[in-house]
Amino acid sequence: MATEPTHSQSIVVRGIAASPGIGIGKAFIVKEESLSYVFRSLAKDEIKKEIHRFRQAIAKTRADVLETREKVLKVLGKSHAALIDAHLLILEDALFSKDIEKKITQEMMNAEAALVAVLDGVGRMFDQLGDEYFRQRKDDVTDIGKRVMRHLLGHAGSQLSELTSRSIVVAHDLSPSDTMRLRDDLVEGFATDIGGRTSHTAILAQGLEIPAVVGLRELVAQVKAGDTLIVDGNEGLIVINPTPEMLENYRKVHEIQLADSRQLEKLKDLPAQTPDGRRLVLASNIETPEEVKTALGHGAEGIGLYRTEFLYIGRNSLPTEEDHYQKYCAVARQMLPYSVIIRTIDLGGDKLANLGVTGLNNEQNPFLGLRGIRLCLRYQNIFKEQLRAILRASVEGKLKIMYPMITSVEELRQANAILADVQQELRSKAIPFDANVEIGVMIETPSAAVIADLLAREVDYVSLGTNDLIQYTLAVDRVNENVASLYNPLHIGVLRLIHMVIEAAHKAEKWVGMCGEMAGDPTFTKILIGMGLDELSVPPAAVPRIKRLIRQTVYSDAQKLAQEILQMTEQDAVQKRLATPKI
């Protein structure tokens, strides 16, 4: 990330904003552990003893994870404890027991070498996954692998136990268990060389309200123990040895933000409505039923995106219809009187292959491969099970169905035909369901955006999935550091596509939502309102801030802003106009 000298002794380092807030304190450096091992070939009579040693390491790691889970449950509740459940599932996965024991037995290598060999294979598999969220789950596997290795090597302690005063923790990486220790040790904030916005460590930091910046690449090498640091979790900045003026400014910002948080809490029960009467639906994105409480607590009026892929993570076999049904019922009931949009499976074939589905080969580029609705149309039994579960649960609340990765009218019609078959099957068995459940498509490819008028005729609503729409439109992988800077939601081509979709849907008298990260970024709220979006679905924590912006934005002014920007020809002009507070 860019390093900007601002003073003879001050350095500003830019990373990824992982948890909002300002933290100021002295640096405490967590040195990277040496987990080196010696490869050892086993004699035949050593195998049994080595497997026993490995199983003991697994058992100790499991005990550690359970202890962390208890802490998370106590402090943050079920929704965050579910993150730790994923680590438990990894430990119970065949990759962490069966495959490693197989290597110890058949290849007669010591447990440390077997662990590393299996982890390397898993890491390569995650690197090939098309979905950014799942690629970042590699960090969870790596974390668990390190913890098992520590027990194998007898290095189970934590450097964080040496903390004696309030500090800023600087590390190459922090595990979720380390993150939970930060709360105990009065940490003002933390900064790490690696990590992403959706890593479990980042999510825990948000729950604990610890300011954090990750993805700083070489910060550990730049900071000395005792340096004064500022963690700016709002902008994703670290300031090393700030000037007195910078310190004073940040302290003022910190105080203002505390007062601001108190004001935002007062908006919880107010509508997302502009001063001149434009009413929007402000919903939340969730992954598990446990997040519903958090969404409602922040004032969300529905679930605009329920990602169902979490049902497939950390398993050895496909989830059953009943697994789906129970989760959907739980969300539907809790969200009443609000609606819930369930996105059907948006996985790549590589993930299903790991769950025992045959006939799937490793793809050269899974991001452009057999994923989303393409996978569902190929493996219709899997798709039908999910649709049956959604329809059965639809009588428990207000559920809507959304198909991901649609690129043509033919795909939409095939999906709807399968849905009609499932509905007929339920009718024949006298199983109740909501016959009027709304059907929508996720617009996340340029082809879908261009034919939005055709798609809108055949659905009840459309929702813009901007993360992929932007990546596919600009041909940019936003986690590829070589081109990530080209990922630009304000690219004129992207804005025109979004506007085109909204106009096409409205012409067909259908409502339009947005559930990508763009919807939750205050930078874009006014222009999105002005373009005419009917619904914004954002992370639960972003609801209050986006609601306030909606309530402060005059719709007619926002429309003028959108029209002005859509006429622009240069990227710089768009950026400058949005940065100019004319409205």
Image (cartoon, helix red, strand yellow):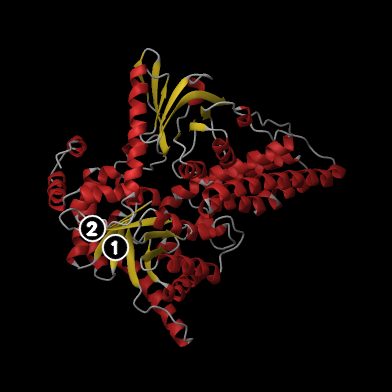
In the foreground, 573 or 582: 582
Q: Secondary structure at mark 1?
A: strand
- Residue designated by label 1: 462
The image quadrant where one finds the N terminus is top left
Q: 524 above or below 159?
A: below
The x, y position of residue 59, in whole percent, is: 73, 47
Q: 34 above or below 294?
A: above
Instruction: Work out whether mark 1 precedes mark 2 in sequence or the reverse, and give the earlier one.
Output: 1
Answer whether labels 1 and 2 touch (C-beta < 8 Å). yes
Tell me the kind of residue under disc 1: Val
Q: Secondary structure at mark 2?
A: helix
- Residue designated by label 2: 501
Q: 440 above or below 429?
A: above
The x, y position of residue 302, in whole percent, is: 36, 62
Q: Residue at x 83, y 44 (%)?
A: 49
In the foreground, 96 or 173: 173
The image quadrant where one finds the C terminus is top left
The x, y position of residue 77, in whole percent, is: 53, 52
Q: Residue at x 23, y 51 (%)?
A: 551
* Residue 40 in sight: yes
* Residue 472 in sight: no
What's the distance in space between the residues labelled 1 and 2, CA to CA? Answer: 8 Å
